[in-house]
Every structure is written in structure tokens, then in C-alpha cells.
Amino acid sequence: MALQLFEGVNLEIKPQLMFVEVNHQGAQHLCLAIQPDEQNMVLGGMQQLATQFIFDLANNVIFFAPEQC
């Protein structure tokens, strides 16, 4: 799975980091761990696991790389 953050900028995320299993009032639910919005997107800690974020401020570019933690 991938999140398209900007045109041409995609963040690959393992499916097991996109969903969380929740037990609520005796029933199990599978919930999407992020919520898209027309103006904002919030990436939680789960989606950032094992990913290195590289910011090139001089050129206004962001890169993602797998991290071996």
C-alpha cells in the first residue's frame, strides 16, 4: 500500500501498519489507522515505523527509505 502525499511523492506502508485491531464492547473491529482529509493528513507513529524520512531543505524535497531497526 502507498500513500500519495504530493504529486510524485509516495510513501510505501506495510498493510499491517495501516490497520489496527480493536476490541470494543465484546466485538472485534479492524480500523484504518489514518484518516484522510481534504487539507491535512496525519501520519501516526505506526506508519513511520522502519521508515527513514530525509528532508532536503535546500531543494524543498522529501525522500523515504526503509530503515533496518
Image (cartoon, rainbow, N blue to C red):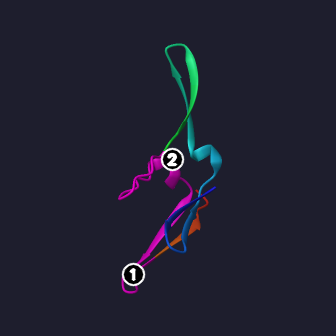
Rounded to the nearest angstrom, the CA distance separating label 1 from label 2 is 25 Å
Please, is residue 22 above or below residue 1 in the view? above
Write the residue at 39% across / 56% down. 38
Label at residue 60 = 1
Label total for image? 2
For the C terminus, the image quarter is bottom right
Is residue 50 part of the magenta span, yes or no?
Answer: yes
- Front disc: 1 or 2: 1
State the residue position of label 2. 46
Q: In the rendered structure, which segment of residues is drawn in magenta?
A: 34-61
Q: Residue furthest bottom?
A: 59
In primary-sequence order, the first of circles 1 and 2 is 2
* Mark 1: amino acid: Asn
Q: Residue furthest top?
A: 26
Please, is residue 42 above or below residue 63 in the view? above
Q: Residue 58, percent across and down?
A: 36, 86
Write the residue at 64% across / 55% down. 1
